[in-house]
Amino acid sequence: MVLAGRAHALSQEVHVSSSGFHFPLVNPQHKNMQRLLINAMGYLKPEHGLVDPISGYPVEGWNQEPLRGLFMRSFTQLTAIGQQLELLANIAAGYADNPYVSKTQALAQLELMLSSLLEDQNNPNLSARGLLVNFLGLDATGRIGPLAEEAIQIKFVEVFGKERGAQIWAALIARGWITPVQDGSFARISRTHTYGERFFTGALAPFAEGNTRKKIMLVMDTRVVQIIFGDNANLTSSAAKSFGALLHPSIADTPSAIALRNKLEKFIV
């Protein structure tokens, strides 16, 4: 009886509200796949704020909690950028019609993203030999490289002197912001919701004076050019697939599609 009941439940027709959506490459009889795609396309809704308006890049985090010190939408990564390129190119080609981003808007967003990518590719603070850093911080004044994952004790000595530098290093360990590794001259940084200028309490309270606090955070939050080949490979692959989508006969010969393909080729090469 249980098995019969399950069979009956699974045989019921799946109703899909497809108003405004059209995926010509997906079998319309595959109702669950249609529903999955429609649900996924909801991330494009402008009210969610998941696209940085300056660069056009998608932001990384869904859960934005400034009160806890979690600014998840203040950075992005290369694989996410690549996926956004592919999605917009497929929308422009007519493979992913939706009520949130039109074909014209997709082309405009692609233009913004590719302009940002070409700019960042030539920024020595964000790239090396054409390869981009794996994470990009999103700032009102522009993009910035990722935060260092390790702290180096000698840097504190250089800024504060041997004795005071050692005191600060010990306080950072006691506060739980760093965990020493190797011989103790290096440490992993733990950036939790109690990390940052607002949390100079406990062992760090003696160093909470404004200028000292700012100098400590400058050393802790050093930006680095960290290149990860896998992330760059993902982005390049997505750029190539976006190029292919923009060869769709409906847009292939339009000036906007031609200009975008030229930019994609320039980025890849």
Image: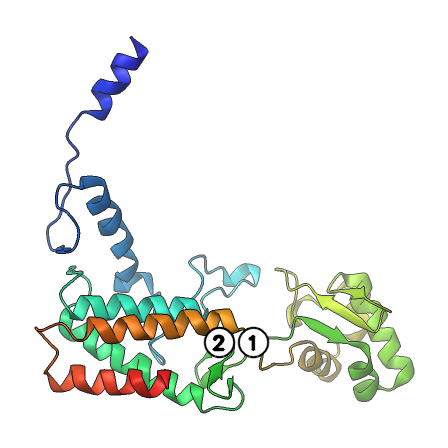
Q: Residues within 10 Å of mark 1 (few under 14, many from 20)?
A: many
Kindly check if marks 2 and 1 are in contact, taking CB atoms under 8 A apart as contact.
yes
Along the viewing direction, whichever of 59 and 160 lies nearer the viewer: 59
Tell me where residue 157 appears, x and y as whole percent.
84, 84
Vertical order, 222 against 198 (above or below): below
Give the total of numbered labels.
Answer: 2
Q: Which residue is mark 1?
A: 146
Q: Which residue is mark 2?
A: 136
The residue lying at 69 percent from left, 81 percent from top is: 214
**CA gap, disc 2 to disc 1?**
6 Å
- Residue 96 visible from this viewpoint: yes
Horizontal side of residue 247 vs 39, given as left or right: left
The residue most toward the right is: 163
- Three-letter amino acid code of the residue under disc 1: Pro
- Three-letter amino acid code of the residue under disc 2: Leu
Element under disc 2: strand
Tell me where residue 182 appears, x and y as whole percent.
83, 67
Tell me where residue 45 appears, x and y as whole percent.
26, 61
The residue lying at 87 percent from left, 87 percent from top is: 161
- Assign the C terminus to one quadrant of the image: bottom left
- Assign the N terminus to one quadrant of the image: top left
Along the viewing direction, whichever of 82 and 240 lies nearer the viewer: 240
Horizontal side of residue 108 vs 149, given as left or right: left
- Residue 75 visible from this viewpoint: no
Horizontal side of residue 166 vs 67, given as left or right: right
Mark 2 / mark 1, whichever is N-terminal = 2
